[in-house]
Image (cartoon, rainbow, N blue to C red):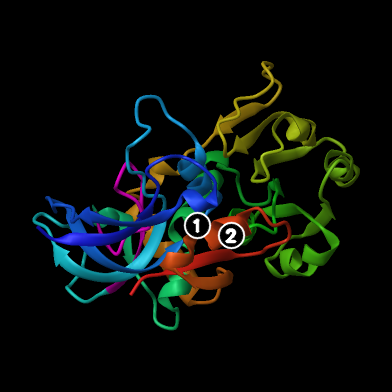
Amino acid sequence: MTMVRAIGVTRPGGPDALGELDLTAEAIGPGQVRIRVSSATVNPTDAMIRSRPRQNDADTVRVPGMEVAGVITEIGPAVDRPFAIGDAVMAIVVPSGEHGGYRADLVVPARSVAKIPTGLSDVQAATIPMNGLTARLALDTLALPAGATVAVTGAAGTVGGYFVQLAKQAGLVVVADAAPQDEAFVRDCGADEVVPRGDDFVAAVRRHHPGGVDGLLDAAALEAAVLPAVKDGGTVVTVRGYQGDGTDRVRVAPIFVRDYVEAAAELDRLAELAGEGRLTVRVAGELPASRAADAHRSLERRGVRGRFVLRFG
């Protein structure tokens, strides 16, 4: 029986609940590949997996982690992707129990995997799949024509920054929020207009666009507070399940990245854009996997830009 090093929790709690675990290697099946993980990105969702209690599973192992990079070590039958043993790849992961990105050996659907482009490190690549696909899904859900106006909250964050760049490449006019220290970055991503983040966001958007914008991605999870920024009949995409205020003035569309977990063509395109420098990858820092608790504490600090990445091996 092959054992695999992982980082996870056996009981929910704070960052210090994370510990090193020895888990049984996952079996591989049709349409799947095995990855020797070298890098696993730390995201806010990981903290929720770590900390939230669930009924009847107080002693169940939970391994966080939704995006990784590494090397393919095994290819299952019926894989329809052009992979070979030894390929450097990045992947999106849907955590469930012992299955999560914080483990040194991981089996995932081949359609959740893309090759790392030349010039991009595995640490950089690990920050793309989940965050990039979330931004891509948001843009596809809005389905705005070129020339339309879209706003985004949390534009200086990882999802927000990717969204600004993808929206500009789609020909949209982008109104983005930013704190003063983040304004230069948001403009470099291509935002046409930058407005203050916080309580004045809606008023600032309406000053630029009195009738409201055509659509909005609420990456900052401000929820009801942002609805007035959008015109009647427009669309607001939300990322934490918010479904609206009960009225139908605007369409509120919650998105869940699991719907794009096997969006292979979209993941390939994100890799291509990052390799070309058209998607800005930001790494806040690297830590050995054994210091996952420190990385999780970093999530609670304000002003951190980019993602921390755990290193295995």
Against 125, residue 130 (above or below) is above
Q: Is residue 76 left or right of residue 312?
A: left
Name, please, the residue furthest toward the bottom. Answer: 119
Q: Is residue 232 left or right of residue 210?
A: left
Give the quadrant of the N terminus: bottom left
Looking at the image, which residue is at 36% across and 46% down?
Answer: 94
Against 56, residue 264 (above or below) is below
Q: Is residue 136 at least partly visible in the picture?
A: no
Task: Provide the residue designation for mark 1.
Answer: 132
Give the quadrant of the C terminus: bottom left
Count of numbered badges drawn on the protein = 2
Q: Mark 2 falls on what kind of element?
A: helix
Give x and y (percent) for residue 192. 77, 60
**Magenta-highlighted residues:** 88-107
Q: Is 126 covered by the magenta stretch? A: no
Image marks 1 and 2: residues in contact by CB distance under 8 Å: yes
Q: Mark 1 falls on what kind of element?
A: helix
Looking at the image, which residue is at 62% across and 29% down?
Answer: 252
Amino acid on which disc 2 is placed? Tyr
Give x and y (percent) for residue 21. 31, 56
Mark 1 burial class by Cα count in 10 Å: few <14, some 14-19, many 20+: many
**Quick one: 102 or 86, which is closer to the camera?**
102
Amino acid on which disc 1 is placed? Gly
Q: Is residue 232 left or right of residue 143?
A: right
Q: Is residue 103 left or right of residue 128?
A: left
**Quick one: 284 or 218, which is closer to the camera?**
284
Give x and y (percent) for residue 80. 17, 57
Tag 2 or tag 1, which sits nearer the N-term?
A: 1
**Quick one: 170 or 93, which is closer to the camera?**
93
Which label sits on residue 162? Answer: 2
Give x and y (percent) for residue 198. 83, 45
Q: CA distance from mark 1 to mark 2?
A: 6 Å
